[in-house]
Image (cartoon, rainbow, N blue to C red):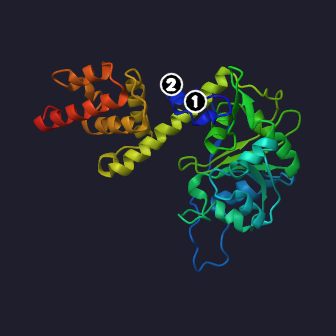
Amino acid sequence: MMQAEDDYWLDLGYAADAVPSVLPSAGGEEISGVEPLGDQFGVWPQKTVPDTLQAPLFGSLADGCETVLGCFAILDGAKIANLPEVLTASGLPHRCLFQGDAFDTLGDAAPWIVQLEAGSSLTRQLFTKGAESTQFWDCEPGLYLRSSQDLDALWQHFRTFTRVRNSQGEWVVFRLWEPYVAQACLEAGYLRYFHGSEQQMVAAVICCNVLEQCTLHHAPEHPGAAPACQLSREQEQAMAQAVARRRRIEMALALRRSFPEQTAGRSRDDLQSMVAQVVQRMSVYGIRKLRSIHVLASWQLFFGERFEQRDPAGQLIQILAGHLNEDAKLAQLERRMDALHETGAL
């Protein structure tokens, strides 16, 4: 587990220990058919959001609803270069969620909340895919909110949860503005961090481009008690599972890119399930690094389930169960797999 003041949710080792499971649903719905914007050369008027996100972000969320809902984003300064300057240039209302020493040292990489407008150039940049420094879609820049509250009220609410205590009492950064962290909280039923308790702070949360998926999460009808500023072990486990799940999905996507022919007939869920099997099976032997899992998952893709048990001499299992460190094990496994492949034993 990471030390106090570190970024709690980037601790891959902790996440890898989480047992893969299906988190309970909290009413999130997938927004299908989302295609990020392109360069739009020669197009006028230019779109600022994909068609399928227009209503969730700037339209009415329910038939007959007369409440005026603004669109806000909590953006990650660690993902958008020079974010304070970008926000100032946009002319849109914005505030940093960090204050004091945290702002002085992390202001450029801090989370900022901004009220978006449908026709703003910043809005277009957030939903534009590409390699240019003003095209932010691919970096998963932040989280989107619909709310009847003003910017200051939302700022006051969310800044309360930028740092929380973990189950051991240590202060940690709680990256709730990360789309996949927010999605995990919402799917696990921890809604009050986002929607409030005594009054509704946020009517809906939109998580965009979380590994090629966008989801919409409505506020609960009956808000519960205010969330404590200390995470329970159950909440930590939900977050760890979210990180582990994200890594499995990333690995499945990497396998599809590396081996398009071998993965052509396999569905997304099938590939993710295969990666999950490899992760769980190899964790017993202390194999956890992303590169190691990628190599082992590719072997399972080519040679079938539990390929390590098909070595006639049993050397693959011996290497896995040995006392070498992970890198040394992988090197020996690669040499043994090359030998088995050359002799046609696999």
Q: Residue furthest left?
A: 343
Q: Is residue 153 left or right of residue 343?
A: right
Quarter of the figure with the C terminus: top left
Dot placed on the residue nearer the N-terminal end, 1 or 2: 2
Q: Residue 170, image x and y in percent? A: 70, 24
Residue 69, placed above or below residue 201: below
Q: Quadrant of residue 300?
A: top left
Q: Which residue is mark 2?
A: 17
Q: Which residue is mark 1?
A: 240
Q: Is residue 34 visible?
A: no
- Amino acid under disc 1: Ala
Residue 299, placed above or below residue 109: above
- Amino acid under disc 2: Asp
Mark 2 and mark 1 in contact (Cβ < 8 Å)? yes
**Helix, strand or loop under label 1:** helix
**Helix, strand or loop under label 2:** loop
